[in-house]
């Protein structure tokens, strides 16, 4: 299996296991800047040079060696599961992608037909019942994760623990796991531990949110989207994410972690 979804700076200063919807665009740009002294001009996910990626066959031996090297900073980033699944819905289901089309083209028609999801359109200002459509999407996401029907689960709503575990299963060990909610402190700790070529001023860098402005804005507090059934579905598929990464399942509006992540516990539970 190797190390899918893993990026490495060209200098070898840090290895990052990408977790979708967890500040991955910003993290990739930080890595790029730390080597080159400039940000990548475009979406960092599209970069084919300046950053080693497991998807590039020539980069794989470098990434494999660095992932197992205890002298290399190896990190990832997590996010509140409630906020993450909402972001997936508003970006990938309700939003329009950078290419001007819907995500995965035929996905939305399937959701409309099988689950009754309606997300409006740019022409009507994305006028739709956000709460009802999100809850129907959540049922679909659960079905893909638990039963792999009507399709395989998408990386944007697959559990964070599943992404993070592939790195561990193949012999990697994280030196840092931080939350998007504490991004500044967490990313700074990674930079401080890494032998970067170019210092990065996190406070002064631009924001990189490739999905922003391409769809509807969330109109309600997080808790409004999660009734008892929705929270049951969240626990069914994301229980490990809540537990391992210390998020408050009982209060969807509490976006912050409730405690520090225990790296030893993460490795023990995700290596099984």
Image (cartoon, rainbow, N blue to C red):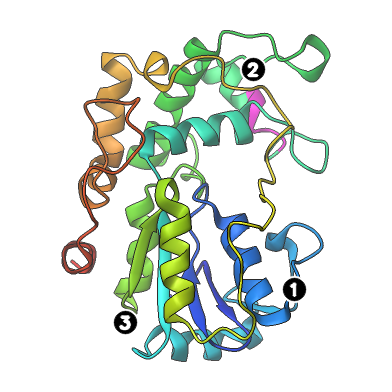
Q: Nearer the viewer, residue 187 or 158?
A: 187
| Figure check: 171 above or below 101 | below
Residue 18 relative to residue 197: left or right: left
Q: Label 2: which residue?
A: 119
Q: Is residue 106 magenta?
A: yes
Q: Quadrant of residue 46?
A: bottom right
Q: Label 1: which residue?
A: 48
Q: Is residue 3 visible?
A: no
Q: Nearer the viewer, residue 185 or 65?
A: 185
Q: Quadrant of the N terminus?
A: bottom left
Q: Check disc 3: other Cα within 10 Å, few if <14, some if 14-19, many if 20+.
A: some
State the CA–CA distance, disc 1 to disc 2.
33 Å
At mark 3, the secondary structure is loop
At mark 2, the secondary structure is loop
Q: Earlier in the sequence, mark 2 or mark 3?
A: 2
Residue at position x 62%, y 36% in the image: 92
């Amino acid at each position: 299996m190797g190390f899918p979804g893993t990026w490495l700076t060209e200098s070898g200063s840090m290895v990052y296991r990408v977790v979708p919807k967890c500040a991955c665009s910003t993290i990739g740009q930080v890595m790029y800047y730390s080597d080159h002294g400039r940000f990548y001009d475009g979406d960092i996910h599209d970069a084919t040079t300046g950053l080693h990626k497991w998807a590039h066959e020539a980069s794989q031996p470098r990434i494999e060696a660095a992932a197992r090297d205890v002298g290399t900073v190896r990190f990832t980033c997590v996010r509140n599961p409630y906020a993450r699944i909402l972001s997936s819905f508003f970006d990938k289901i309700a939003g329009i992608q950078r290419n001007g089309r819907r995500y995965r083209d035929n996905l939305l028609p399937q959701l409309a037909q099988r689950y009754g999801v309606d997300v409006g359109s740019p022409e009507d200002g994305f006028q739709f019942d956000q709460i009802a459509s999100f809850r129907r999407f959540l049922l679909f996401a659960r079905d893909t994760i638990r039963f792999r029907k009507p399709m395989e689960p998408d990386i944007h709503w697959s559990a964070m623990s599943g992404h993070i575990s592939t790195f561990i299963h193949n012999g990697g060990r994280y030196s840092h796991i931080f939350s998007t909610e504490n991004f500044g402190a967490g990313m700074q700790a990674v930079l401080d531990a890494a032998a970067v070529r170019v210092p990065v001023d996190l406070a002064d860098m631009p924001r990189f949110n490739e999905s922003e402005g391409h769809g509807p804005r969330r109109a309600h507090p997080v808790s409004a989207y999660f009734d008892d059934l929705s929270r049951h579905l969240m626990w069914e598929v994301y229980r490990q994410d809540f537990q391992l990464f210390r998020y408050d399942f009982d209060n969807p509006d509490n976006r912050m972690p409730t405690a520090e992540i225990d790296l030893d516990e993460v490795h023990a539970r995700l290596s099984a």
